[in-house]
Every structure is written in C-alpha cells, then in structure tokens.
Image (tube, rainbow, N blue to C red):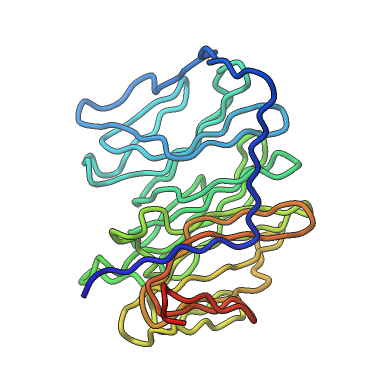
C-alpha cells in the first residue's frame, strides 16, 4: 500500500514584506565546542533568542565528553549511539554565558521556547529508564528492557535566564519518532507563562495530567498526536488528542498574538477532525 501524506496548517499567517534592496550580511561570530572525545561529536538542532538578543542553542552530543568553556560534560556510555541533550546560552557578542546537559541516560531535544521573562523551556525525549537534569531525576514510566523501541518518554524543562533549572517534568512513554517523524512536535509559551507542548503517541490510551487520550487507531500501533497545556509551575492543565485510524503527526506548535495557538503537521488517515472542522485526505470527501 503506498504511503499517503496530507499536510495541514491551522491558524497560520505568512507575509513577506520587501522594502528596498536586500544585501547579503556578513557573519558576526561563530562558535563550536572547545573540546570533545576523539570518537565523539555534537549536533546543533534548535536556536532561539531572548529579549536581550542572547542566543540559546540546543542539540546533543555523543562520545565520552564535551566541553564549552569551563563547562565539561561526561557521557556515561562512550558511544556514538548514546546521545545527551545540550543547552548552551551565548550573549549577543558570542560570549558563552552557560551550558547544561542531560546525564545518566540518553536524550535529545525536540523544541525550545523563551518567554517574556527570558525563562527557557526545553522539550525533548529520552530513551532510557531514567534521565537526570541537574539534580532532577525523571523516570520513564513505561520502560521495557525487552522492547527498546517502545521506551521513549518526553521531558519538559524550565530554566531561568541564569541557567538555573526551575523544574523538570516527564510524560508518557512510546512517543518515539519513526522515519516519518524526525521532529515529532514542539513547545511554545504564552504571555502568561503557560506552556504548550505537542507530540505523537501510539499507545491505545495515554494519561496526560487528568485527561485520558484515546488513539483513534486503537491497538494497531498507529500514531496520533496531542497538545498539552502546563501552567508556569509545571502542572498539567489539560490535554487534547487528535488523529484518525492511520498514522497522523504534529510537526510544530506556536503561540501568537490574540491568544491564538497554531500547529502544523501531516496525516495519513482519510480524514482528521479539529473541533467542528474536518480535513479530508485528497479526494476522499
């Protein structure tokens, strides 16, 4: 059966303003790690700026160790297959302010966001029985040593602008990305400091806070997706699931002016519902 895709976009606004001539800009600065293991490496995936034009980069490293200025991190497993989340903050001139990393597990980031107080949010997944960020231990509630493909669990972190970890939360298991979902979701924040995450799940049911989400694909292992809202203290306020009987994915989430929340993604199902709006695949209407 051929793989079918249909992309959707909700609450999206795009404008291109062209005034005068556009000129190529020169690089002001570039940075990389100061040291690392011979068999190691690192990849940058995400970047955000705050109101002070500071730059927050997130990615992961693998191998035995890596360092950024005075910050050195050691991977518990010296392997290219064992990756650890990295968060690095530079000022507007490229001077390193601080760096943070996961430890005692395996993880990578999916999305980052910055609020109006310059707090930083990192949303990602981890694939081990637990992960530690600073002194916060997050446990994977569905870890199964006999079936490693089902062991992915999400994490959500909040740092202040100085790099202090304010809180860390874990979430449901089995949200692993497959070949169709290398970036399964994202994170955004509103003007009141509430946080919104989006990601996929392929469990028949999952519990997020007080909400039980049911996969429209039943027990067939299909991917649906959900949006969850957290308050500024890290408590789940609500969660809503979406999807049809086939694989459906969310790619990113954003919060805009006027208290509007937007998501984008794609679906394989014949149709998918968003409230009273039903989107159909191709000509199946």
Picture quarter containing residue 205?
bottom left
Q: Between 215 and 33, which is closer to the camera in this rendering? A: 215
Picture quarter containing residue 45?
top left
In the image, 51: left or right of 72? right
Query: How many numbered tags mark residues here?
Result: 0
Residue 138 in view in this figure: no
Q: Between 274 and 181, which is closer to the camera in this rendering? A: 274
In the image, 276: left or right of 247? right
Q: Between 101 and 274, which is closer to the camera in this rendering? A: 274
In the image, 211: left or right of 85? right
In the image, 265: left or right of 129? right
Q: Between 105 and 108, which is closer to the camera in this rendering? A: 108
Relative to residue 91, is residue 210 depicted above or below? below
Q: Residue furthest front?
A: 283
Relative to residue 182, is residue 23 depicted above or below? above
User: Residue 260: x percent and y percent?
Assistant: 72, 60
Picture quarter containing residue 117?
top right
User: Residue 284: x percent and y percent?
Assistant: 42, 81
Q: Residue furthest bottom?
A: 218
User: Residue 122: x percent and y percent?
Assistant: 54, 48
Give me the residue at 61% from left, 49% from top: 158
Give me the residue at 67% from left, 36% from top: 161
Residue 192 in view in this figure: yes
Give me the residue at 36% from left, 78% from top: 246
User: Residue 78: x percent and y percent?
Assistant: 23, 39
Which image quarter holds the N terminus?
bottom left
Give me the residue at 48% from left, 84% from top: 214
């Amino acid at each position: 059966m051929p793989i079918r895709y249909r992309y959707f976009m909700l609450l999206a606004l795009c404008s291109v303003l062209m005034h005068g001539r556009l000129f190529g800009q020169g690089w002001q600065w570039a940075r990389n790690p100061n040291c690392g293991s011979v068999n190691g490496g690192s990849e940058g995936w995400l970047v955000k700026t705050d109101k002070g034009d500071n730059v927050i980069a997130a990615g992961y490293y693998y191998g035995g160790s890596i360092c950024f200025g005075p910050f050195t991190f050691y991977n518990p497993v010296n392997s290219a297959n064992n990756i650890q989340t990295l968060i690095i903050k530079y000022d507007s001139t490229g001077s390193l302010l601080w760096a943070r990393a996961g430890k005692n597990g395996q993880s990578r980031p999916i999305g980052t966001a910055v609020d109006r107080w310059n707090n930083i949010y990192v949303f990602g997944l981890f694939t081990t029985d637990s992960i530690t960020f600073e002194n916060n231990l997050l446990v994977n509630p569905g870890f199964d040593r006999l079936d490693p493909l089902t062991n992915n669990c999400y994490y959500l972190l909040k740092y202040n602008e100085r790099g202090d970890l304010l809180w860390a939360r874990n979430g449901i298991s089995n949200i692993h990305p497959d070949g169709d979902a290398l970036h399964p979701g994202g994170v955004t924040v509103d003007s009141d400091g509430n946080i919104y995450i989006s990601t996929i799940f392929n469990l028949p049911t999952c519990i997020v806070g007080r909400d039980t989400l049911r996969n429209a694909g039943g027990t067939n292992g299909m991917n649906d997706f959900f949006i969850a809202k957290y308050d500024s203290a890290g408590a789940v306020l609500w969660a809503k699931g979406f999807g049809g009987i086939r694989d459906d994915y969310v790619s990113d989430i954003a919060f805009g002016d006027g208290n509007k929340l937007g998501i984008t993604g794609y679906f394989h199902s014949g149709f998918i519902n968003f409230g009273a709006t039903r989107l159909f695949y191709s000509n199946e209407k």
